[in-house]
Amino acid sequence: MTHQTQRHAAGWKLENSYKALPDKFYAELELNKVTSPEIVTINEDLANSLGLDVKELQSKDGLNVLAGNSIPDDATPIAQAYAGHQFGNFTMLGDGRALLIGEQITPDGDRFDIQLKGSGRTPYSRGGDGRAALGPMLREYIVSEAMYALGIPTSRSLAVLKTGDPVYREVELEGAILTRVASSHLRVGTFEYAFKWGTKKDLQALADYAIDRHFAYIDPGKNKYLSLFQEVMKRQANLVAKWQLVGFIHGVMNTDNVTISGESIDYGPCAFMDSYDPKTVFSSIDVQGRYAYGNQPSITGWNLARFAETLLPLLHEDQSKAVEMAQEELYRFSDLYHANWLNGMRSKLGIFTGEQQDVSLIEDLLHLMEEHEADYTNTFRALTFEKFEGMKLFESKEFNDWYKRWQERLENQTESKQSINQLMQENNPAVIPRNHRVEEALKAAVEKGDYSVMDQLVCVLSDPYAHSDEQEPYTTLPEPSAKPYVTYCGT
């Protein structure tokens, strides 16, 4: 297989460690060139951290790499194979519209996958065209960078460009490619693929690769595959707790979207909750509410159970013993998640130490928020600055009673009011990517070619804990609507 390669000054320093795995885990790709690529937005801070020259990335040579028209020297474009449980149903998948250029080695020695999303057909496209539309790629750029700024482990977005070629869905749309950066694209679904269609040797090679790439600190003297499961479970418990703490709803928590690294990935029908309601669903295809906000922790546990199943052949030669070992670890997930969430909620309320009463204090507040349809982000922001105007929650007797309990709890601490307020400011964002603001930015970009609205939004979201005057307009809620907000998978 031949590719057009070139030398250029952008600073690419790529390796292809994933290709050391058996070749059933990937397919080498020919490039699917686009007509007239044009940069829409580029993430200068991320580029610099990767050791890339922003000016060179925007040159003709640099642009051709981001468009998938050419590749840097020594790179080998591949699509990764994986499977997954999609809404509970198992199926063969793979990178159907993504090309992995390679793994960039940064000046600090870190390793990041560089993937082009929307780069054309692959052997795993399953009848799709392998392309992407401009709107969904800009959406992933906005939300993934907002998640990063919120301190949530996530894949990131280096650039979005227009391809100059249309894509056809229900209507004709502008084609686009997103350059996605991730610690890796190893997924629970990758292990499901190996377990279903590979040999034990293949599965072991994948597990060893995952350990080397993400968990090199694992003690080789212990059962390293059990340790692998433990580490992935810890990261997922931390991740979903962080989602819950900011009101983020992923929307499509299939096992192919659960990373081994513990990063959020694939921002399709995702959105942030306004009024607090555990039943909130935004995805047009999640008609049963499987991935509703309140279900995300339990679904994470379900996904981890599928991961544990794939590791059984490696945990112990005796399958019944392997099952017992996996179950023993899985029982710990709920406590791991709850500890992460509880610590985060304490911080949001300015609580430094743990007391038994904290759980009921937090749960009672959430119940009041749900009952009064209070905005999730703005409620905690109001508590941070003790500004209680404009929300019916704060006018209720029940809230006044709760507020007295909260103040008594804070007074039991030795920390100063200034320290308490600082803790709350650091854990309660002023701004999130509110759905109406994201849609406003996408509409201006896609329909008018005006990217200034998006640029301003991304700038505001880049420091969500600043609580600045410039952020104030972005804290307002959308106008009331008879129709609920709905998101769609970006295909």
Image (spheres, rainbow, N blue to C red):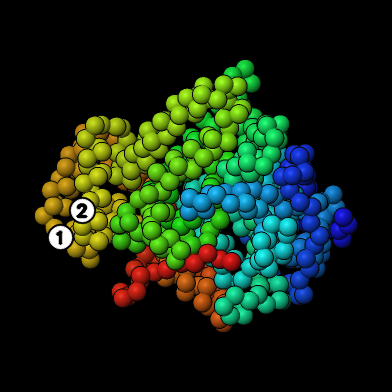
**Residue that mark 2 sits on:** 368
**Pointer 1 local density, CA inside 10 Å: few below 14, some 14–19, many at least 20:** few
**Residue at the outermost top position:** 221
Q: In terms of depth relative to the viewer, which is nearer, 110 or 222?
A: 222
**Residue that mark 1 sits on:** 395
Residue 106 has which mark? Answer: none
Q: Secondary structure at mark 1?
A: helix
* Sequence order check, earlier mark of 2 and 1: 2
Is residue 242 shown above or below 34? above
Q: In terms of depth relative to the viewer, which is nearer, 441 or 305?
A: 305
Q: In terms of depth relative to the viewer, which is nearer, 195 or 402?
A: 195
Q: Secondary structure at mark 2?
A: helix
Q: How many marks?
A: 2
Q: Residue at x 16, y 52 (%)?
A: 399
Q: Is residue 119 left or right of residue 142?
A: right
What distance separates the C-alpha of mark 2 from that of mark 1? 12 Å
Q: Is residue 247 left or right of residue 305?
A: left
List x then y, in percent, for residue 176.
Answer: 66, 70
Image quarter hosting the N terminus: bottom right
Q: Residue at x 17, y 39 (%)?
A: 408
List x then y, in percent, for residue 463.
Answer: 48, 56
Q: Residue at x 63, y 41 (%)?
A: 196
Residue 47 appearing in the image:
no
